[in-house]
Amino acid sequence: MNKEDMWESLLDKCEKIYSSDEIAKITEAYLFASKKHEGKIRLNKTDYMTHPLGVSLILIDLDVDSTTIISALIHETINHAGATKEEIKEKFGDEVANIVQIISKLNRLELTDNSEYAALNLRKILVGMSEDVRILFLKLADRLHNLRTADALDKEALKRKVHETMTVLIPIAHRLGMYQIKGEMEDLCLKYSKPDVYNDILERLNASSKELKESLDEMEEAISEMLMEQNIPFKIKSRVKSVYSIYNKLNNGKKWENIYDILALRVIVEKVSECYLTIGLIHAKYRPIPGRFKDYIAMPKANMYQSLHTGVFGSDGHRYEIQVRTEEMDEFAEKGVASHFAYKEKHYIKTMMEQRLEILRNLIESTNSLSDIEFASDVQNEFLNESVYVFTPKGDVIELPVGSTPLDFAYRIHSDIGDKTVQAIVNDTSVPLNYKLQNNDIVKIRTNPTATPSKEWLNFVKTTHAKNKIKSYFSKQDKELYTEKGKIILANELRKRKLVFDQILSNENIKKICKDLKLEALDDIYFSIGSLRYTASYIINLATEDKKNVEDILIEKVLNANNYSKTNTKQSEILVDGQNGILVNLAKCCHPVYGDEIVGFITKGEGVTVHKKNCPNLKDKMDRLINVEWNCYNDETFEAFVLVLTDSTKNYLLDIVSKATTKKVFVDKVKTKKEDLDTIYEIGVKVNNKSQLDDFMNSLYDYKFVKKVERK
């Protein structure tokens, strides 16, 4: 189909869905994009506009809103036609500008290698950046159309595209319930990656296509007669199973003759009650295949898919998969979350699947302190792996990752229930708290108001939510313990010095101490004493302005090295003047990492701050310096900041992030600054050591747009 025919087809569909004002805006977007892409040809020798039009035609069949269609028509104008976000914002508004800008960034990001780690990381970025679910719709439709026209790509590029689609985009389409897009992507990926296998399955299907079509027609006629006799309004759709689905079953060891659902019929009725009645009628006439009945209406899939599934032996000897559902269920089964996507007075209405995306974003936020490997594990467990469905005693369905325990169930219900759990009863039988829940388990939790969590629970709970709640409880408990301990230590020191509490810790002095030490309140002062961050003497001296000199502080630190808290993660890695256990902190001005040449600076009351030897902030402070050295390496990560100067005002952030991923460097923070015709990126990264950091910095020179890279 040429550009003009595609536009006519899109316009016809728009007229059935959108208002005249919306169609006018869509037409404006088409003309804008056509002008921007004028004269450009795709690799397959077609007009460039056939791609945005193809993407729009995929999306309009999902019943998306007009904003999504407008965004689809102009989604390539930033990367490939020199348009700017400001220009798009002026013509089409904030929503469209934001969607197009983000999709432009996402389309420049590719898998760095074939590892599962890289795929998980890219999924993380895609979902994390897609604050608006329409961005994911657009990304999936964009990839599907590119796959339809991928014959023009060279072998290596096609191989990369297929791998990225299978490992990154198809799992997202699956979780969104967008089965039409998912199924076609799978077939196309198989066609390109294993053409011999694909063609063999296709030939076997085609060889028996006449026989299969006749069997489907006969079964369809028989079911129709049954439903008409019962006056049940219905529609029937029939199909032969997709090539990829058959490949998957063959690949898992099934024989062709044992694939039960090559022939499939879908019966669509008006009411839920009619779904069950229809299944009953079918089972009364045709012998069910054992174990093939699934009730996804009472217990929907993770992506909210609902339907009744069964397998039966037909009178002709063929096996059939039959699905029965309502019109609304069928709409969702075909289009996933897009079928429920709605706007009302321009306010976003969240769907169940958008809430799932929000859960994933919350997971990203709650694991920011983890390594990428740990993050990948959590995402794999909670978003991409299979789920189990269990029931509350009232019959509510709770979805949990496979391997979850009654404690994960309890914390999913409410954190207070989790904290006070004393017994789990599953299917009327008492089970251990580390019992692995199974599908259809009915779970009851018994609590005790005086019960508290156990640290042992962390060894077997599955969900990140449960782990965080348990850790939070003990963190709060530890803080209360240290606060009470600090209060006692301070009171003893005041008694020893025969000082009056109300005079030393008056409101004015408390404010002064908090300001000096960057604390919030009196309890924070107690906590800092109890956790041995500061001594009681030092706090009293701050209040009375009787501060020790540098030499006294150093002597106290070295003599009492073993009394310092072991909670600081860097203590065991750094020796101070040969002593282990002295409170140390890594300087925020120069951010030393393992392997740098370092020196210590003695602070007033906060131990020793470790700087790089060439840190400019140490000038004229020789009297406070002390020898420090790296002691051992405990697999810690260190924060560092890198300045990247590029010779363009174009946005190269995704290229830099992509390079970091290949070097296993985690990008934590980013600031961008424009200077004339250049752009400076200040990148906050987490690295294991100086060698890894240097390797990352040197690798950035692979990009021609990079002029200079240096540590801040």
Image (cartoon, grey):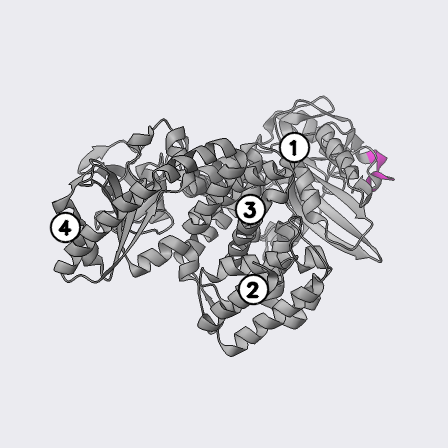
Crowding at mark 3 (Cα within 10 Å: few <14, some 14-19, many 20+): many
- The one of 520 and 140 positioned closer to us in this rendering: 140
Q: Mark 1: which secondary structure? A: loop
Q: Is residue 58 magenta?
A: no
Read off the residue under disc 2: 5
Of the numbered discs in the image, which one, if any, rests on residue 281? 4
Q: Mark 2: which secondary structure? A: helix
Alpha carbon distance from label 4 to label 3: 42 Å
- The one of 90 and 712 positioned closer to us in this rendering: 90
Crowding at mark 2 (Cα within 10 Å: few <14, some 14-19, many 20+): few
Query: Relative to residue 342, is residue 607 depicted above or below?
Result: above
Q: Give the residues in magenta.
A: 617-623
Query: Relative to residue 126, is residue 11 depicted above or below?
Result: below
Of the two numbered discs 1 and 2 in the rendering, the one whose residue sits closer to the viewer: 2
Alpha carbon distance from label 4 to label 2: 46 Å
Question: At which x and y percent is residue 328?
Answer: 32, 60
Specify the amino acid type for callout 1: Leu
Of the two numbered discs 3 and 2 in the rendering, the one whose residue sits closer to the viewer: 2
Alpha carbon distance from label 1 to label 3: 57 Å
Q: Which residue is rendered at x = 22% and y = 61% of the image?
A: 271
Read off the residue under disc 1: 583
